[in-house]
Image: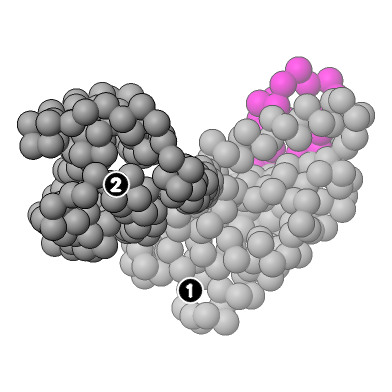
Amino acid sequence: MGKTGVKGLSLARRLYTSRMLGLVLGLLCVSVAMYPLNPAPWVWALMLFNGLIWPHLAYQWARRAKAPYHAEHRNLLVDAFLGGFWVAAMQFNPLPSATTISMMAMNNVAIGGLRFLLAGSVTQILGIGIGWLIFKPLFIPETSQLQLYACLPLMCFYPLALGWLCFRQAHTLGRQKSELLALSRTDSLTGLLNHGAWKDQLEVEFQRCQRQHQGGAIALIDIDHFKNINDTYGHVAGDIVLRQLSKMLKQNLRATDVAGRYGGDEFCVILPDLPLNNAAAVMEALRDRFATLGYEQNPALKVSLSIGLAAFNPGHSDATLWLSDADRALYEAKTTGRNRVICCGDGRSQYELLDSV
């Protein structure tokens, strides 16, 4: 079943309960208004069918239809037609008629907006016309006290049910929107932030460091000879290595640190409020643990990391310069033998070699 079918079934399920409640309460309203008019037995039978049987029939009709969404809209037009029919049958009794028309209009607006309100109104007028031809109604200008009380449950409880239905739909849409936003910012393989989302966080961190005169560091991490891993052991093994590194980042970094997949075999980390020497120690421990983990998984699989670190530099005008420092440090780590951590410290041009093989 396609997306439209799923959407239609979801709509039918949402409307099933509200339709049952609305039509049962509507049956009370209409039957009390009709009783003084001494309607024929077939009219009573039609009232009972509309109030007690139609909600279940409409649900099954929509559920079994090839296009449930369109079938449910057709059911709503049937509701509108029958509502107009009963307005004429009640001799246009003011309060029951106004209650019926307003509840139908509220339902149509909630489900389909202005366009469906217009379609429902036209169908309702058609129902009034058919009822006029059958009953030749006379206008009854007064509503009895009993008829007033019979309308109150529909006026009170049906808007509450419809409001709850709209709230649940809005809540579901909000949750789905949040999930989609999270997915759009997350790398599907590793579960870390993707390139764009991490760079957004880098900009936020850069602004915070400037505003609060705080320090911090960022790291760019590259898996050494990753192409050879894919070529030798296959892309499945390569994906395992990527997931291992992402898992290790999640487990060993602080809650305030922000890790992401920069692209391909490159990862990136924001380390707020962490001096460069401390950040280097964290990255060195990560490099050492990752190499050990790779050997434990497969003795033939050689894995290592090259890491470039850069401290926040108050002299930089934007975050891209901070990132460029880390990128140059990473390049230095890769060109001087790999499997090491190189720092670009506090705005200085020189690099510090922390570890080498």
User: Residue 126, position in %: x, y?
Assistant: 14, 29
**Which residue sits at x=26%, y=62%?**
52
Residue beneath the point at 78% across and 58% down: 254
Q: Which percent across, then down, holds residue 20?
A: 33, 58
What residue is drawn where x is 33% and y is 45%? 33
- Name the image colouring: one colour
Residue type indicated by callout 2 = Pro
| Label 1 vs 2, first from the N-terminus | 2
Q: What stretch is highlighted in magenta?
A: 310-332
Left or right of 73? Residue 152 is right
Mark 1 vs mark 2, CA separation in Å: 90 Å
Magenta span includes 123:
no
Residue 113 rendering spot, x and y as whole percentages: 35, 29
Q: Is residue 158 visible?
A: no
Q: Nearer the viewer, residue 232 or 69?
A: 69
Classify 172 as above or below 217. Answer: below
Q: Quadrant of the N terminus?
A: bottom left
* Numbered circle sitting on residue 36: 2
Q: Residue 301 carries which label?
A: 1
Quarter occupied by residue 46: bottom left
Tell me, yes or no, whether the highlighted magenta stretch contains residue 319: yes
Q: Is residue 268 above or below residue 295?
A: above
